[in-house]
Amino acid sequence: MTRMLAIATDAEEAETAVQHGAEIIDVKDVDGPFGTAAPALVRATVDAVAQRRCVSAVVGEPQIQPEALARAAATIVDAGASYVKLSLYAHSAQEDCVRALSWLDAPREPDGVTFADQRPNDALIGLMAQSGFARAMVDTARKNGGRLLDHMDIAVLGSLSIVHAPTA
């Protein structure tokens, strides 16, 4: 199933996106490469779309630590986000950050976002699956640093889609 996701930077943009068929409203601070939105903005967006659409929001900054990430995710959940996306910037606590969000569960399973232009950790997507993440996304952190395929071979991208969570 294909669903349209639209990025919105405020409640007015969210409403416009809904009127034009967006099924998921992705709240984002566009000043950063994968900008964390303030909880107040997430709440205003959730209120604006009045349960007509799912709202996603991102948490995570380049050097965020696991405890801070868990707190940030909790504020986004409390603000009403349907999905929480975790920016997995390359740093030493990256895997611990994934584990720090394993407490999220249906309907707010986290989505993990790793960056092809930051030497992605090959084991990270498997760890996301084991930690209960619903989806994994590969993106570029620097939006002016080339396309995804400039940083990652298509065969490598294809191999990522075969990762599945272990069955109980």
Image (cartoon, helix red, strand yellow):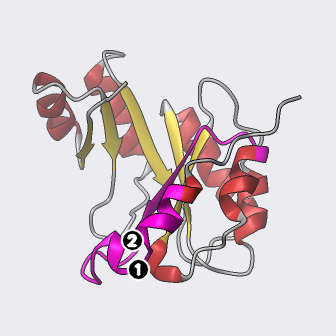
Q: Start and end of the magenta stretch?
A: 130-158
Mark 1 lies on residue = 151
- Asked whether the residues under the numbered discs 2 and 1 touch, taking CB atoms below 8 Å apart as contact, a structural biologist would say yes
Q: Amino acid at mark 1?
A: His
Q: Nearer the viewer, residue 109 or 152?
A: 152
> Considering the image in quadrants, where does the C terminus appear?
top right
Q: Nearer the viewer, residue 29 or 110?
A: 110
- Residue 34 vs 132, above or below: the answer is below
Please give the name of the residue rendered at 60% of the width and 37% of the height, measured from the top-left corner: 134
Name the N-terminal-most of marks 2 and 1. 2
Circle 1 residues within 10 Å: few <14, some 14–19, many ≥20? some
Identify the mark at residue 140; answer none if there is no mark.
2
Secondary structure beneath dot 1 equals loop
Secondary structure beneath dot 2 equals loop
Magenta span includes 156:
yes
Instruction: Name the spot of residue 85 as percent of width and height, x first.
Output: 52, 49
Structural distance between the alpha carbons of marks 2 and 1: 8 Å
> Considering the image in quadrants, where does the N terminus appear?
top left
- The answer to whether one can see residue 39 in this image is no
Please give the name of the residue rendered at 39% of the width and 40% of the height, measured from the top-left corner: 42
Magenta span includes 101:
no
Quarter where residue 150 is shown: bottom left
Instruction: Name the spot of residue 126 as percent of width and height, x first.
Output: 72, 54
- Residue 71 vs 77, above or below: the answer is below
Q: Nearer the viewer, mark 2 or mark 1?
A: 1
Circle 2 residues within 10 Å: few <14, some 14–19, many ≥20? many
56 on left or right of 18: right
158 on left or right of 166: left
- The answer to whether one can see residue 87 in this image is yes
Please give the name of the residue rendered at 31% of the width and 35% of the height, measured from the top-left corner: 25
Q: Amino acid at mark 2?
A: Thr
